[in-house]
């Protein structure tokens, strides 16, 4: 008996030593190994990010400035900071030495704090003493180029991987991307023959020219340069067949295109001249890309209408000048997520063509209080507010902007149009070789300054103040498509912070019961007050302040009923807390007892199975 007990305790001790040894070995041998069991694979790099890391030509230094000690007082921020740090470590591990990660906790008035400011990471003031909280990322490459994420906004945690991948891609490819820009609108400025003065370029055009290698595509161009990262088409009217064929070939080669088409481009019209109706010459190309665009109709939306100047200078609601809020923008696409508002004017609408083979993801859309209006009707209308008379919405949402991707068909299946001469050596494509990346918007007026910019005169200097996010939308689109297909493929993930859905459901159910009880209490209170008022009017001696027995009984009844209902309300709240506590106890039991027990039983079963196999495999020895 003693021997058996000693053997049992010895086995327990040996098992404990084995577990300690395995823990030490795993800490050293399996460093960097992980198993991502989260629902949305928050800690797993996407395929596009892995390809970007493999394409880094020279080592890149990443500096993660994170005030860890200061974050201890904010548990949610500390949790997100740890998540960002772990994600950066995963990226550095997967880059095979091409990324050197430096984690820095800047102290006040230190060299590290100066370094953060030098690299573009901004600190948020925490107190009057001047201490700052840092939570950003900076990167440098071998050519002294640097990029930065000034601050990791927890509200943009869905795009964490995209933002980091974009920073790495820009450092690995520091050359400004080539953007070919074609516009039938006077965006680039120049001489205005009507006023006899020079016309300033539109602000969105100036911003794009500062950030990219911007070239103007000539209307008669027969070929899109091979190194073009993005082709921008703004209201492309009256394009010659050679240019349309060049755009088709660029799309088949897997080009990146941003198109602004418009059934009624008011910005293209001369003063006191009705705008041209009929839309651009891109409808045929859009159809081959899987997008249906009707150039004869404009969307009017009563709920999103903005004020405009009506006859006599009076402000009127214009149902074709629309202000789109966050509810009309996709929060799952990096181009539109985070924008506050976008204004559009006489916009058309887009829809996918079934069987086209391309994906169609809406980015901007109308409310359900909208309907199509003939563009010809609006062309000569001086007071569009008249559209609100007898307005009958269709109840549908109309798409103003969309992301389209996939291998497309040629709009010229028989080859180049007649009379088109291509440069020598040009290879004609009849089918797509790479997927097209297209961002298309059914409005071009949204780029004009009057819809999103307010110009201020300050001491003789003209300053531009944005009052809408139209410019940010265009720059986001250029920023997204100017990267590689790998970067474009890195889409938003689910947020790192996960809500307690069970707890929220319990709370909503209890609050619903609470509201019902509260409404019942208020109803009984009103009824009692009415009865008291009625009793007051029927008193024999109206000058006395002494309550009658009936009034006293009514008040006593009301007070007793009020006490009872309050007890019920407290019981509901106590039940809510009890339900949440029970759920918390269940989770603790599962995490602390059940799951370890399951793993332990699985380990014991595996050990027993191996022991049995070894016993079966051992040969039987026969004694002589």
Image (cartoon, helix red, strand yellow):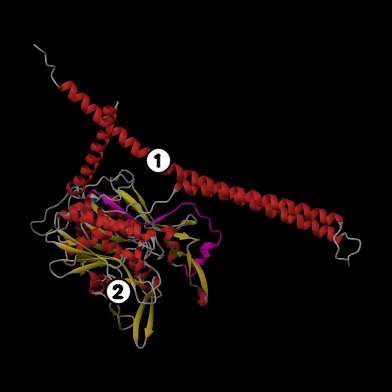
Q: Nearer the viewer, residue 390 or 142?
A: 142
Q: Nearer the viewer, residue 25 or 463?
A: 25
Q: Is residue 345 above or below residue 437?
A: below
Q: Quadrant of the C terminus?
A: top left
Q: Is residue 255 above or below residue 104?
A: above
Give the percent coordinates (x, y) of residue 105. Answer: 27, 66
Q: Nearer the viewer, residue 595 or 445?
A: 595
Residue at 46 percent across and 51 percent down: it is: 396
Q: Quadrant of the N terminus?
A: top left
Residue at 29 percent across and 62 percent down: it is: 477
Asked whether, in this view, residue 212 is left or right of residue 453, the answer is left
Question: Is residue 251 at least partly visible in the picture?
Answer: no
Mark 1–mark 2 Cα distance, whole angstroms, equals 44 Å
- Residue position marked by numbered label 2 in the rendering: 108
Give the percent coordinates (x, y) of residue 530. Answer: 78, 57
Furthest toward the right, the residue is 540
Q: Sequence order check: which comes first, mark 1 or mark 2?
A: 2
Q: Specify the label residue 590 is tagged with.
A: 1
Give the percent coordinates (x, y) of residue 541. Answer: 91, 64
How crowded pointer 2 is (Cα within 10 Å; few <14, some 14-19, many 20+) is rated as: some
Picture quadrant of residue 542: bottom right
Asked whether, in this view, residue 379 is left or right of residue 193, the answer is right
Task: Specify start and end residues of the magenta stretch as a single range.
Answer: 381-409
């Amino acid at each position: 008996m003693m021997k058996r007990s000693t053997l049992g305790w010895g086995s327990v001790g040996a098992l404990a030593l084995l577990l300690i040894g395995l823990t030490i070995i795993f800490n050293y041998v399996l460093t960097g190994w992980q198993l991502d069991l989260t629902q949305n694979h928050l800690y797993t790099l996407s395929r596009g990010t892995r390809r970007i890391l493999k394409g880094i030509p020279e080592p890149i230094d990443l500096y993660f400035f994170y005030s860890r000690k200061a974050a201890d007082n904010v548990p949610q921020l500390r949790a997100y900071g740890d998540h960002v740090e772990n994600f950066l470590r995963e990226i550095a591990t997967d880059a095979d030495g091409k990324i050197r990660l430096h984690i820095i906790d800047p102290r006040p008035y230190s060299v590290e704090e100066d370094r953060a400011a030098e690299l573009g990471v901004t600190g948020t003031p925490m107190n009057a003493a001047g201490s700052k909280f840092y939570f950003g990322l900076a990167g440098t490459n071998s050519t002294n180029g640097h990029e930065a994420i000034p601050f990791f906004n927890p509200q943009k945690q869905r795009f964490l991987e995209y933002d980091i991948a974009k920073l790495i891609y820009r450092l690995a490819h520091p050359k400004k991307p080539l953007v070919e820009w074609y516009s039938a609108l006077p965006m680039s400025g120049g001489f205005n023959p009507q006023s006899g003065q020079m016309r300033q370029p539109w602000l969105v055009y100036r911003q794009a020219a500062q950030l990219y290698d911007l070239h103007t595509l000539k209307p008669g161009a027969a070929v899109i340069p091979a190194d073009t990262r993005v082709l921008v088409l703004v209201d492309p009217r009256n394009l010659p067949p050679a240019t349309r064929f060049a755009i088709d070939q660029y799309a088949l080669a897997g080009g990146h295109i941003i198109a602004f088409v418009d059934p009624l481009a008011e910005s293209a019209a001369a003063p006191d001249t009705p705008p041209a109706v009929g839309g651009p010459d891109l409808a045929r190309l859009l159809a081959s890309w899987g997008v249906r665009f009707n150039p004869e109709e404009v969307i009017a939306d009563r709920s999103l209408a903005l004020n405009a100047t009506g006859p006599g200078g009076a402000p009127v609601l214009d149902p074709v000048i629309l202000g789109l809020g966050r509810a009309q923008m996709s929060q799952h696409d990096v181009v539109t997520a985070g924008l506050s508002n976008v204004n559009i004017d006489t916009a058309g609408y887009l829809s996918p063509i079934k069987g086209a083979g391309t994906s169609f993801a809406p980015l901007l859309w109308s409310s359900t209080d909208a309907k199509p209006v003939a563009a010809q009707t609006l062309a000569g209308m001086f007071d569009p507010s008249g559209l609100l008379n007898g307005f009958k919405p269709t109840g549908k949402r109309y798409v103003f902007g969309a992301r389209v991707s996939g291998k497309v068909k040629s709009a010229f299946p028989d080859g180049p149009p007649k009379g088109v001469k291509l440069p020598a050596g040009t290879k004609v494509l009849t089918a797509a070789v790479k997927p097209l990346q297209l961002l298309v918007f059914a409005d071009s007026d949204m780029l004009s300054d009057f819809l999103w910019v307010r110009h201020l005169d300050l001491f003789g200097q003209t300053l531009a103040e944005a009052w809408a996010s139209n410019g940010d939308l265009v720059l986001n689109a250029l920023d997204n498509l100017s990267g590689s297909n790998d970067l474009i493929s890195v889409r938003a993930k689910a947020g790192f912070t996960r809500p307690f859905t069970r707890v929220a459901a319990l709370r909503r159910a209890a609050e619903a019961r609470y509201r019902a009880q509260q409404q019942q209490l208020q109803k009984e209170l009103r009824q009692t007050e009415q009865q008291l008022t009625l009793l007051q009017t029927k008193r024999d001696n109206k000058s006395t302040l002494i309550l009658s027995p009936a009034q006293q009984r009514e008040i006593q009844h009301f007070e007793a009923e009020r006490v009872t209902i309050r007890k019920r309300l407290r019981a509901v709240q106590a039940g809510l807390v009890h339900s949440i506590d029970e759920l918390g106890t269940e989770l603790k039991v599962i995490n602390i007892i059940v799951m370890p027990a399951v793993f332990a039983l699985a380990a014991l079963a595996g050990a027993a199975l191996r022991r049995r196999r070894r016993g079966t495999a051992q040969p039987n020895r026969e004694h002589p």
